[in-house]
Image (cartoon, rainbow, N blue to C red):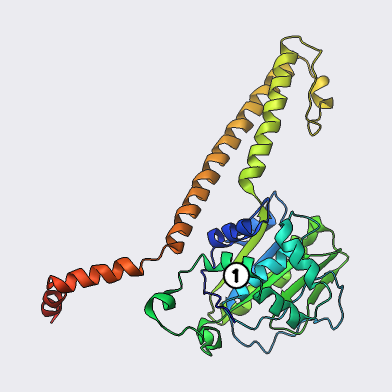
Amino acid sequence: MKVWNKIEYTPEVFTELIKNIGVKGVQIEEILSYDSLENANIPIYGLIFIGKYFKNISYTPNILQYWDKDLIFSKQILKNIISTQSLIELILNNEDKIDIGPNLKELKTSMREMDPLSRTVSFMNNEKIRNEHNKFKVDLSNELNINDNTNDNDNDNDDIYNFITFFHFKNAIYEIDGLQEGPILIENNVDFNDWTKKIKDTLIQRISIYSNNEKQFYLMALIPDKLEQLINQKDLLISKKNYIEKKIEGNNDIKIENELISLDELNGMNKEQLEEKLKNIEFEINECNNGINIEKMKMNKYKEENEKRQHNYVPIIFELLKQMSEQGIINELCEQNK
């Protein structure tokens, strides 16, 4: 079996990872409070709950024995793979809402008739995903000649994280935990626009369990690409601004190509109302520009952090230690510390 490296569980890693695999128009963002989730003005495609594994005997979920074959559920068996496995599984279960790209479409088609364990094996053998996953952690064992075969057989539960996803699928809310025997049905007959409100009690219960047991946890969301959304919003506002300016100038023979812009409200306004509307739109354009700049800075920071993760510092460290040893610096430092 080829090695899957351990990677960090951060939004910047997950966001670049899924983009490299071919998923378009989405990103991963950490949720710091339920209020920010509840008041979000963008769609939430799914949630990822990450917590240190511990056995909770009080939790008795509604585990399904039979479920829709379009719902992708696979078993979690290797700890270094489960972060990417859970993330990709969440994306596969949102194919009707987002562009998952050709790589994942092919993967989902191949998995469709498989049992949960066979799906895991298929995922583990996917070279494209494994290569992109491994970019985010330099495999030091190759440089140090350390046998890394025991990575995923480590029985130290303090280092094992459980990845649980929540999402809306065919008018129902599901929980996927690969350590269980099947998907968990949380609630039926739920509209997509309401699902994050309906999941609130489940999340609060899960968070309280971890908090009461002094366990560390993270909550992340799969959301639309913010930068892309802001740029599209700005383009709409600029088109509307140009239309209003021409209306104020007295030009009534105006054609506007963007079908997303509603002109009914504008056509019923007098000059003073149009001028007031124009001020509001210019303010909104400035707000979009501020948001775009913030997102660009954030993405640049993500890129820098990920480049550091993907760089192998071992050779330069060895060379530095070698030079320090040859010049007697290491012995001198040891004597000083004595």
Q: Which residue is mark 1?
A: 130
Residue at image position (68%, 90%) is 57
Rendered location of residue 84, percent (x, y): 62, 69
89 or 20: nearer the viewer: 20
From this viewpoint, is residue 275 visible?
A: yes
The C terminus sits in image quarter: bottom left
Residue at image position (64%, 60%) is 21
Three-letter code, disc 1: Arg
Residue at image position (23%, 72%) is 321
Whether 197 is drawn above or below 209: the answer is above
The number of callouts visible is 1
Secondary structure at badge 1 equals helix
335 or 320: nearer the viewer: 320
Whether 259 is drawn above or below 218: the answer is above
Instruction: Mark 1: give few (<14), some (14-19) or many (20+) Cα within 10 Å.
Output: some
From this viewpoint, is residue 204 visible?
A: no
Whether 116 is drawn above or below 26: the answer is below
Give the left or right position of residue 296, taking residue 189 as reference.
Answer: left
Whether 181 is drawn above or below 310: the answer is below
Residue at image position (56%, 82%) is 213
Residue 244 found in image quarter: top right
289 or 201: nearer the viewer: 289
Give the left or right position of residue 270, taking residue 76 as reference.
Answer: right
Give the left or right position of residue 112, taking residue 214 as reference.
Answer: right
The N terminus sits in image quarter: bottom right
Rendered location of residue 90, percent (x, y): 71, 66
Give the left or right position of residue 116, taking residue 224 as reference.
Answer: right
Rendered location of residue 113, percent (x, y): 84, 75
Residue 249 found in image quarter: top right
Residue 140 found in image quarter: bottom left
